[in-house]
């Protein structure tokens, strides 16, 4: 099982977990496994079955947009990082 | 005429006459002393190198040699050695080089990059090989604009000013609120209600009076963004909303200004550096602006006080490297800090050829 890192803004959708273990050999399968357990996550990460433009997905340190998108392979020792745009700052 | 082989010590006035009559001048001080100023026609030959190099520097033992150091001690020893070794026409300046200069003796000093006060104040970082006087000069000449004098801007501004960044601009239209003080360390309890830029200027002026602080008491918007950033070398982005981040990104790409980006949320922080057309920009990461509900501000979400401190100082560190032109910046890398786990990690960010701001289709 791969490890999925949940960013702070999405933790409420997964009961507060910082990381989750997920099954799947591709990003698509890993996300499907997560959505089965945490349905609230689906609308935050995808839009009409595609990755949301506001959330980047990395396998280890590589953006899947520059690999095979949702078909990017995920190995059991890989870490999948969900990274939504984050704006918090000064005020 | 004195006996040629006796040791002759001369005053500064006599030395001037000897120099005027064509005597060769030998400076037996060290290289570092020479670097700080020297007689233009002199030849540097440090005392310790004299035996090994004199034959090459002054092969003719009959030719007259005027030897000097800083005050006359080393030159006396050098002269004695020269006479013992067959030099017949040697004079040692027994006076201070200051006397030579006071009497109008020729002098050449390198342009001083730092004043004596600056050399004292910044001595600990001038000692660092990658900085030195030239690097410190760059810092003193640098103009850095901080968007936001709040959580991220506070630590960045404090350290940028302390280390001698010459001009710090602050863009903020807010006033100090009691709830800011938990993390916005530029401000103070007795300044609640004061404009943040004014409070920041007071703090920075007390820390380093040499830093020129420019208050931009306005909120960054589409009409003022280009004017605000135009005069600065580096922009530090510590804003709290997507509107400002995208406005800033597009203007910075257009004007080719590097932006050091920081964002924080509860226990997590992110920092990266955008160098237009050399690395990715913010739109390369997220091409379109997310809806505002995806950017809960500190006021809504909460933030650990120390977190902007850590992120803001990483931003300041990026500024130093950009200004000095040394090291590896975070361009092309997003650094993520998890304060709960004390974990740093990073992901790679690519320049997107289709980026609406800096991609192939965008006007460069």
Image: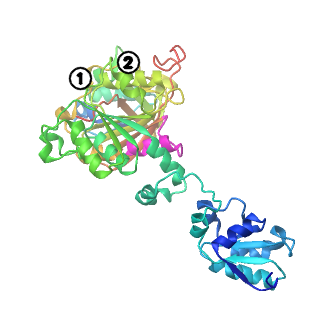
- Location of residue B364 with respect to B209 vertically, above or below: above
Residue designated by label 1: B293
Q: Residue at 33% of width from left, 50% of height from top? A: B208
- Location of residue B87 with respect to A10 vertically, above or below: below
At which x and y percent is residue B98?
57, 68
Give the camera-side residue of A63 and B265.
B265
Please give the label number shown on residue B288. Answer: 2
Give the camera-side residue of B305 and A1.
B305
Give the camera-side residue of B257 and B240.
B257
The quarter of the image holding the N terminus of chain A is top left
| Marker count (numbered) | 2
Q: Toward which corner of the image does residue B308 lie, by quadrant?
A: top left
Q: Residue at 54% of width from left, 50% of height from top? A: B134
Q: Is residue B135 left or right of residue B180?
A: right
Does B326 appear in magenta?
yes
Q: Chain of mark 1?
A: B
Q: Is residue B144 left or right of residue B12?
A: left
Instruction: Write the start and end of the magenta stretch as one range.
Output: B314-332
Does B152 appear in magenta?
no
The quarter of the image holding the C terminus of chain A is top left
For the residue carrying disc 1, how many other residues have a C-alpha within 10 Å: few (<14), some (14-19), or many (20+)?
Answer: few
At which x and y percent is residue B140?
44, 45
Q: Secondary structure at mark 1?
A: helix
Q: Is residue B20 left or right of residue B32?
A: right
């Amino acid at each position: 099982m791969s490890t999925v890192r949940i960013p702070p803004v999405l933790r409420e959708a997964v009961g507060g977990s910082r990381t989750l273990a997920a099954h799947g050999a591709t990003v698509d399968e890993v996300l499907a496994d997560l959505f089965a357990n945490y349905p609230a996550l689906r609308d935050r990460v995808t839009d009409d079955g595609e990755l949301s433009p506001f959330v980047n997905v990395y396998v280890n340190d590589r953006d899947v947009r520059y690999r095979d998108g949702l078909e990017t392979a995920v190995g059991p020792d890989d870490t999948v990082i969900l990274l939504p745009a984050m704006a918090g700052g000064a005020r | 005429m004195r006996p040629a082989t006796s040791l002759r010590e001369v005053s500064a006035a006599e030395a001037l006459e000897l120099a005027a009559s064509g005597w060769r001048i030998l400076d037996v001080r060290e290289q570092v002393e020479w670097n700080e100023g020297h007689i233009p026609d002199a030849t540097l030959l440090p005392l310790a190198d004299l035996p090994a190099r004199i034959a090459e520097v002054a092969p003719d033992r009959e030719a007259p040699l005027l030897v000097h150091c800083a005050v006359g001690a080393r030159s006396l020893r050098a002269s004695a050695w020269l006479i013992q070794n067959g030099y017949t026409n040697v004079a040692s300046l027994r006076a201070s080089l200051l006397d030579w200069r006071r009497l109008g003796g020729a002098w050449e000093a390198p342009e001083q990059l730092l004043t004596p006060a600056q050399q004292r104040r910044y001595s600990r970082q001038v000692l660092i090989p990658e900085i030195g006087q030239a690097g410190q000069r760059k810092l003193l000449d640098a103009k850095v604009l901080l968007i936001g004098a709040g959580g991220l801007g506070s630590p960045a501004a404090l350290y940028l000013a302390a280390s001698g960044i010459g001009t710090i601009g602050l863009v903020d239209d807010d006033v100090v609120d009691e709830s800011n003080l938990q993390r916005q360390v530029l401000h103070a309890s007795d300044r609640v209600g004061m404009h943040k830029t004014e409070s920041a200027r007071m703090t920075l002026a007390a820390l380093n009076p040499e830093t020129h602080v420019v208050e931009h008491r306005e909120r960054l918007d589409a009409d003022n963004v280009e004017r605000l950033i135009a005069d600065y070398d580096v922009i530090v982005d510590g804003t709290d909303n997507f509107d400002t981040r995208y406005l800033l990104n597009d203007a910075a790409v257009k004007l080719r200004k590097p932006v050091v980006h920081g964002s924080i949320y509860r226990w997590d922080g992110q920092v990266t550096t955008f160098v237009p057309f050399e690395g990715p920009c913010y739109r390369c990461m997220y091409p379109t602006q997310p809806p505002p509900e995806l950017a809960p501000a500190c006021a809504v979400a909460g933030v650990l006080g120390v977190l902007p401190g850590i992120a803001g100082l990483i931003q300041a560190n990026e500024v130093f490297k950009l200004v000095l032109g040394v090291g590896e910046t975070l361009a092309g890398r997003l650094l993520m800090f998890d304060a709960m786990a004390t974990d740093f990690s990073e992901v790679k960010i690519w320049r997107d050829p289709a980026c609406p701001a800096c991609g192939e289709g965008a006007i460069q």
